[in-house]
Image: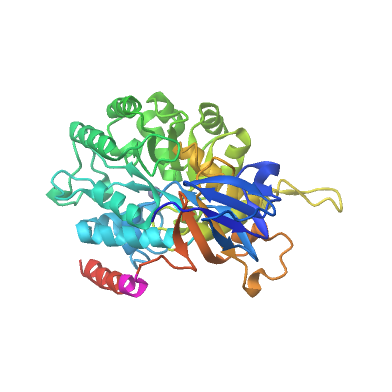
Amino acid sequence: MSAGRYLIRGADALVTGAAGAAARSDASDLRVADGVVVEVGRGLDARPGERVLDAAHCVVTPGWVNTHHHLFQSLLKGVPAGIDRTLMPWLQAVPYRHRGAFDEATLRLAARIGLVELLLSGCTTVADHHYLYHPGIGFDTSAVLFDEAERLGLRFMLLRGGATQVRHVEADAPAHQRPERLDGMLADVERTVQRFHQRGSRAMRRVAFAPTTINVSLRADELKPVARAARAMGVPLHSHLSETVATIEHVRQQHGMLPVEFAAEHEWLGPDVWFAHLVHVSPSEQRLLASTGTGIAHCPQSNGRLGSGVAPAPALARLGAPVSIGVDGAASNEAADMASELHFAWLVHRAHAGSRSRARPEGQGEAGADAVTAYDVMHWASAGGARVLGFDGVGTLAPGMAADLAVWSLDDPRFFGLHDPGVAPVASGARPRLKWLLCDGRVVAEDDAVPGLDLAALRDEARAAVRRIAAG
Ligand code: ZN
């Protein structure tokens, strides 16, 4: 998959990924060379050696950036003991209950399934929060994940999770699944950064230091050393935070403060930090997040599926905090693709705001209901995600930026009659056919398929793995 020269020509609409009025371009054509967008315009002529991609009846969007996932969970969808449960019973019944099943081959298969699912939803950058790290696990977990992403040609950021403390939900774990010690964790993160982390605005491989959940995975006195180690290595920090009301109570009881205040206390806020969820954050915590540039990986479907709540992503965006979208693991989001995540994000915030709105004088509609636009959501899922992860050269379709882009065909009755084809990927509730997906200027999907991938074989392997996992 070498970076080619392409002219994408004649699109009905071009979504740039930028915020506000710049979200929608008048251009129909886009030229790509050496992995970047070199020209955006109308009526561009093909040059010798360029492949022309006919984008008639298509909308072009940036490749989506998924800022929070757990790929290993792609083989834990719809586990009966965990469906329709809230966070803690679900954690116990699904990811913790089955984590021993993830040997090297099973992890590889799960990662492949999750990555292919994301890729076919137009996602080109995946940040995977992987936390199955145990002393003596017997294989190189991080290498498996980087390898699977590279085979598919995707940009991949490993959010290196893990814990030094045992949570009460996993107290029955066998000895080989015990947590790490801090020195072992630090040494492995350093090794991983040295081996995989690339600098540069269009890096294909990145690493973040991401203890699973800061208020339970580490001792409080380990948080500052971890934050300082990450900053010394020049990698960002990530964790879960404020997912449920029970979390807030737990932190308040243990530490006498709110979770974001707890993070601040331990040097865990800043433009190099982002948290998954942040569902329950007070107005003062929201201001603290925004003023420090701390980001959110907003996971609305998982938060809905687990009954956790609706994160104040629109309020955070209005305050200037970096907002991005994550699908979270497929064990708590059986629709772990960016297309359904975007559709749900758009609807849930409009519905949620509307449920608290008040009537204006007759004929003037509802006050407070306009929480987000379809273009806001696409911005969060592209430039917003790139900002959160620290990829300066990714997430926006403009000259000089990475050629990470999707060409969506609107050749389906669902999309007939659309006045603005630009909103199709969010508003229409099903992903359009993916005509082409480019990552760093390489074609990684064509005509709704991944070149060289045997989907039927992958399905059969998944089925066999599910039987194995269910049998325990
Ligand atoms: Zn998560």
Residue 285: x %, y % from top left: 52, 32
Quarter of the view holding residue 56: bottom right
Which quarter of the rendered picture does the N terminus lie within? bottom left
Which residue is drawn at the image coordinates 51% and 48% (left, top)?
Answer: 33
State the residue in front, 378 or 301: 378
Would residue 104 appear left or right of 406 to someone viewing this image?
A: left
Direction from residue 55 to residue 76 in the image, left or right: left
Decide if residue 348 is in sight here. Answer: no
Residue 204 in percent (x, y) is at: 38, 44
Residues drawn in magenta: 454-459
Principal SS element in the magenta part? helix
- The image shows residue 266, relative to residue 344, as above or below, that is above
Residue 348 place in picture, x, y as percent:
59, 55
Quadrant position of residue 407: bottom right
- Which residue is the extreme one toward the front? 48
Count of marks overlaid on the render? 0
